[in-house]
Image (spheres, rainbow, N blue to C red):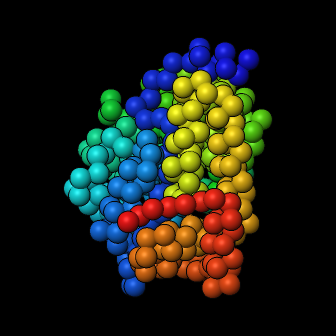
Amino acid sequence: MAQDLASKKQHTGQIKGVLAAALTPMDGNLNIDHEAFAGHCRRLLDAGCHGLGIFGTTGEANSFTADERIAALETLVGSGISGKSLLPGTGSCALPEAVHLSRVALELDVPGVLVLPPFYYKGVSDDGLFRFFAELIERIADPRLRVYLYHFPRMTGVGFSLSLIGRLLEAYPGVIVGTKDSAGDWDRISTLCREFPDLEVFAGTERYLLDTLRHGGTGCISATVNVTSQLARQVHDAHEAGRNDEAEALQEHLTSLRSAIEEYPTIPALKNLTGRFTGEDVWQNIRPPLTRLGDEQADELLSRMRDLGLRQDYS
């Protein structure tokens, strides 16, 4: 049944497959290190990522000002990273800021923008959230705009109900095109794939990569793909080629790595691993209120990754 769903769905989005929710490196003054950022993005694309989600949760987006995010995005594209490979987070609690960030992103030829709901006020109605996105779309008023809804209620306290998604799709077909679902709820992801066949559904974890693809979803946008990109791409490619047994075995390995990393604070853990793999000290820097991984935890994590067969070659 799942394979039937996958075969019937025609993906219309410009970006699909395995995307890393890219980490953002910082210098000793906790400013974005643009050179290291471009280098990291190139490594991820070379390792098999179809694209990159930048300035999402893993990228510490809400620890940066709008100007910092814009400067980093423009510098990244100016360094040779194609805008077509980027899905930038442009969400903000301030509607004009979300509009501005999205407009800048569109000028850099991105295939879409990933937008959080306005998250400060809790308990808001679907009507209020609909109005926010209606205002966003109508103020931008650009035929190039493609919006991906970022559902992460554990962080935001505000999410997208299925009825709200349906309402937005009906009101703005061809503009509301997809979602990243980071609720960690497989039943919800499978329901999205089934109920909204025109919606590009990305799982927020590679734990559900193969299942999402089999149910007609688009792929995953995941934090841990910063270090599992090669393996995640292998899962994707084995599925696409119809090598089902191979895909399942690879997915089992991928899930074991994800599960181990999840036992640590995610962003500090991933920055530490990236620093260990690259030898770049810049990855030890992280903006408050987040803190570095302790030395004992860092050594334990690296040992576990090696025991589980994670290998990264950044030479």
Q: Residue 216: percent from the left, percent from the top?
A: 61, 25
Judging depth in this view, the residue of 260 and 177 nearest the camera is: 260
The C terminus - image quarter: bottom left
Q: Is residue 197 visible?
A: no
The N terminus - image quarter: top right
Judging depth in this view, the residue of 63 and 170 nearest the camera is: 63
Q: Can residue 277 be seen in this view?
A: yes
Q: Is residue 139 above or below residue 190?
A: below
Report whether 262 appears left or right of 79. Answer: right
* Residue depicted at x 31% and y 45%: 83
Q: Residue 226: percent from the left, percent from the top?
A: 51, 58
* Residue depicted at x 60% and y 60%: 310
Task: Give the quadrant of residue 197.
Answer: top right
Report whether 256 appears left or right of 273. Answer: right
Task: Give the quadrant of residue 146.
Answer: top left
* Residue depicted at x 69% and y 36%: 248
Q: Residue 212: percent from the left, percent from the top?
A: 65, 33
